[in-house]
Amino acid sequence: MAALDWFATDVAAPQLRREPRRARTAPRPRAEGRRLRGGIVWISLFAILLVGVVAVNVAVLRANMALNNLNQQQLQLESQNQTLASQVSSAGSSLRIEQAAHRLGLVPAQAADTSYLDLAHK
């Protein structure tokens, strides 16, 4: 048996076959970052949409309140117009005018004393 010299330089160590190493490339950006950015974009869009919907609802509410105030004002004005029309009607009634004439000393004309004037003939 031959002695094995472990420190001998003339004996070559058996070489293992290795596959050639591939050059390392830059790591791919993770999909999680894209997902996170996409999620933030969608959340922002939905928030803006929600703010828009709330703003439209507030505008409609204000318009309805203004319309309600105008309707109430219209009803009050119509009531005042009816009251004034009633006052004008009562002021122009023949009974009231006759009473005012009696207070001034005027009397109705006799039917025999009345005559018609024909304006067509000069």
Image (cartoon, grey):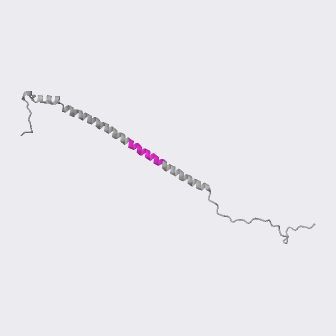
Q: Residue furthest right?
A: 1
Left or right position of 26 against 70: right
Q: Position of residue 43 (x, y in %)?
A: 53, 50
Residue 65 colored in magenta in the image: no
Magenta-drawn segment: 50-64
Left or right position of 93 against 38: left
Residue 110 in sight from this viewpoint: no
Q: Residue at x 56, y 52 (%)?
A: 39
Examine the residues drawn in magenta and state their main secondary structure. Answer: helix
Q: Position of residue 97 (x, y in %)?
A: 15, 31
Give 55 or 93, whichever is nearer the viewer.
93
Give 27 or 84, whichever is nearer the viewer.
84
Q: Quadrant of residue 23?
A: bottom right
Quadrant location, the C terminus: top left
Left or right position of 108 against 92: left
In the image, residue 28 above or below residue 67: below
Give 1 or 32, whichever is nearer the viewer.
32
Residue 39 in sight from this viewpoint: yes
